[in-house]
Amino acid sequence: MRDRTAPGARAGAEQTVGAANRRLLRYLYAPEQEHPATTVTDRWAVLEDTLEPVLDEWTAWGAKHRELIQDGRGLPGKDAATYRLAAIEADADPPALLSDIIARARALSPDG
């Protein structure tokens, strides 16, 4: 499908996202970048794109997500509750990147 966004609006949106990325990275005491590459550290993680391309690698999650929507137990689109339930009920482990992020996040908690 062809992108019909006006070039000026697209440029404005990219500047807004770039500025927000810089502010967030500054808050994390990370090197400021407008469009950072996927990076995972012991304190934070950033994805170059959105979460969906990472989830596309997790076929069990995708199948469960579709099943939840079809069965009326989940909502289509970017619905946090449906994403969470699909992750819980998926019958295979997440991709290495997500597993790494989860392990590092657990390590931040005193309870692990």
Image (cartoon, rainbow, N blue to C red):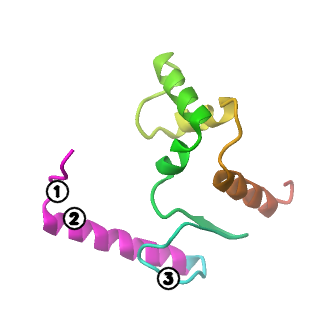
Q: Who comes first in sequence, dot 1 or dot 2?
A: 1
The foreground one among 38 and 78 is 38
Q: Position of residue 70 (x, y in %)?
A: 47, 18
Q: Quadrant of residue 90?
A: top right
Q: Is residue 90 above or below residue 112?
A: above
Q: Position of residue 46 (x, y in %)?
A: 56, 65
Q: Which residues are magenta?
A: 1-26
**What element does badge 1 sit on?**
loop
The foreground one among 36 and 9 is 36
Tag count: 3
Disc 1 marks a residue whose amino acid type is Thr
Q: Specify whether residue 8 is painted magenta.
A: yes
Q: Is residue 45 left or right of residue 5?
A: right
Q: Is residue 107 left or right of residue 2?
A: right
Which numbered disc covers residue 5? 1
Q: Who comes first in sequence, dot 3 or dot 2?
A: 2
**What element does badge 3 sit on?**
loop
Q: Is residue 18 above or below residue 102?
A: below
Cβ–Cβ under 8 Å for marks 1 and 2? yes
Cα distance in 3D space between marks 3 and 2: 22 Å
Task: Name the residue located 37 percent from the left edge and 74 percent from the top edge.
Answer: 18
Q: Quadrant of residue 31?
A: bottom right
Local packing at callout 1 (Cα closer than 10 Å; few below 14, some 14-19, many 20+) is few
Disc 3 marks a residue whose amino acid type is Glu
Task: Name the residue located 30 percent from the left edge and 69 percent from the top edge.
Answer: 14
Cα distance in 3D space between marks 3 and 1: 27 Å
Task: Name the residue located 45 percent from the left edge and 78 percent from the top edge.
Answer: 22
